[in-house]
Amino acid sequence: MQWARFLWSYVSYRKDLLAGLLACSAVMAAAELTVPWLIKQVIDAVLGDEPSVGMNAWLLLALGVLGALYVAHVLLLRIDALMILHSSYELRRRLLHHVHAQALSFFDRHRSGELTHRLTSDTKLFETSVAKLFRDIPSEILVVVGVTVLMFVLHAELAAVVVVFMLAAAALTGYLGQPLPSLRKSAQRVSARLAARFQETLAGVRTVQGFNNEAHELSRLDEENRGVLKLELKEGKVYALMEPLGDMVELVGLVLVVWYGGRLILADEITAGTLVAFIAYMEILARPLGHVEAYVRSIQTSRAVGERLQDLLADREKLPTGGRFASDAAPSIALESVYFRYPGAERDILNEVSFAVQAGEVVAVAGRNGAGKSTLMDLLLRFQDPSAGRIVATGADLREWDLDAWRRSVGVMPQEIFLFQSSIYENVTYGRPDAAPEEVDEAVRASGLERILRRFPDGLRTEVGERGAQLSGGERQSIALARLFLRRPKLLILDEPTSQLDGEALQLVRAALRPLMAGCTTFIVTHNLDTIQLADRVLFMEGGRLAGDGAHEALHAQEPHYRALWEEAGLSAVKGAAGVSQAL
Ligand SMILES: Nc1ncnc2c1ncn2[C@@H]1O[C@H](COP(=O)(O)OP(=O)(O)OP(=O)(O)O)[C@@H](O)[C@H]1O
Ligand SMILES: [Mg+2]
């Protein structure tokens, strides 16, 4: 019972509240059971030989019992809300931590819209269905057990008739509700897919509109939307059969008890008071039994959704972390026969790559699209681990380093720059939120961002829009560079840092990169000949292999493929190089 364990871990988050809830349920059940018993006492006394019963005392007693019932019910609802809300908070917290503890390949498996759906819709649905169960089920189980016992005490034969009838009704409801969990699970899965697809169309809205593809996207969204409808209609059909059954059970049960009980009175086997008590107990019993359908629904829903949440929590992709801490010095990096293949892929993206880079060296990485350059950088960042071979940083396998500390020592400018929806200031200080204002000013100056800021009246307080959409590509790159200046890394990884800069910005950035690279081991992935000049040496990647390693001029002279790379790009490498050295 995986699900039961999950449910328990959810509600047992606040054991004190759980205990309080069960106590209130017990008081409620006891109070409810007492009322028909009191009615029987008074009726039998009034109709009996000795009608001198203390009616006022009886009324006080009955009101006292009802008062206790009311207070217990109020408390129960308060505690239920507190318990469930706290548990949901804890569940969301667990999910958030879980998702952000995963390695990058986890995110290749899950779409962001789907994860959002699980964190919002699934948890909410789980919360509502579990809240219902814990609010009603404990007291109603106690009531059912108590009523059954009391009915047997009053008259075993009549009680047996009632119990057999009720069991048959409950079995029928359970049978009808069987398809519900799998239907609910599918419905949640399909609506998560709808959410993921919708989010994708929003993220890519410029592409959608640019290709005039709204109709196509809408028809794909509609397909998922219709999938949700189909499953929910099927669910509705099951409920339509189950719900009226609850009402019927109550009435049929009543008729049955009056018919059988009436015969027993005629045969002088029971008193009128006993029959009235039975009718009252039936009335009480009918409520939980009428709720069986709703409970089945809540149990099935919480089970279906709980399983989805459990699956997500069980899906973990964690990179092991070692205990070694980086020293303050720039690291040396050596790759020893490194192979890498993406999970589920059929070919190696990196193929027996070996090289050694001294501490403080500046290395350019060049190669055609898809050669594996960004993948290599991901390995250095430890977004992924090699499938075979090892990466050695300052004499120790990267896997032996403390993962967080290693990442802290690395400064990265990814190929696709991501800005958060806030001000330029917050984006610049993203890697160092505690940076002093002078440090921020210095980073802004050194990175050349200052020149861009002059165009914005709000300067650093300018809002960048969702994902930085309100800025140009070059502006985004400048912000990412300023971010790196504040970070003061020991290993610098720049994946095409200047691809979107204009001539003037390029000059500024190239001048700015030099001080940034001082004291760092640097890797610069680039298709730009000017940027290559910043490096002492070039690693030339071709189809996942290291096809050349040396100074740009030497590679250009000796490696025809390397030469072709630049010539195809329409650049005269030699001329470009000469031009650059003059500029520098
Ligand atoms: N997450 C992924 N899952 C599976 N394959 C991937 C993934 N990311 C990249 N690849 C594949 O790995 C290969 C190398 O990609 P990579 O991004 O390292 O190339 P690159 O050299 O940086 O190219 P570019 O110059 O275009 O940036 C490509 O063929 C790509 O299709
Ligand atoms: Mg790349």
Image (spheres, rainbow, N blue to C red):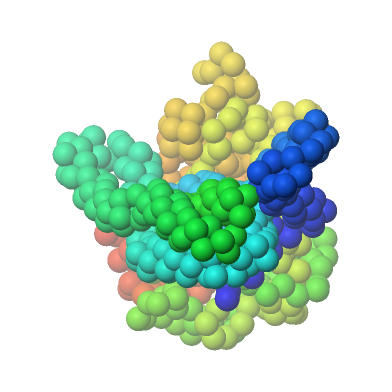
Q: Residue at left 41%, top 53%? A: 255
Q: Is residue 526 left or right of residue 96?
A: left
Q: Quadrant of residue 148?
A: bottom right
Asked if 6 appears above or below 30 in the picture, the reply is below
Quarter that holds the N terminus: bottom right
Q: Residue at left 54%, top 50%? A: 279
Q: Residue at left 74%, top 40%? A: 51
Percent of width and height locating residue 60: 81, 33
Quarter that holds the C terminus: top right
Percent of width and height locating residue 372: 43, 69
Percent of width and height locating residue 415: 47, 52
Residue lying furthest front: 49
Residue 418 visible in rendering: yes
Residue lying furthest top: 457
Q: How many marks?
A: 0
Residue 35 visible in rendering: no
Q: Residue at left 44%, top 74%? A: 342
Please name whichever residue, 358 or 144, is drawn nearer the observer in this view of the structure: 144
Q: Is residue 68 left or right of residue 347?
A: right
Please name whichever residue, 266 or 340, is drawn nearer the observer in this view of the structure: 266
Q: Is residue 571 left or right of residue 130?
A: left
Please name whichever residue, 476 or 37, is drawn nearer the observer in this view of the structure: 37
Q: Quadrant of residue 203?
A: top left
Asked if 562 appears above or below 49 in the picture, the reply is below
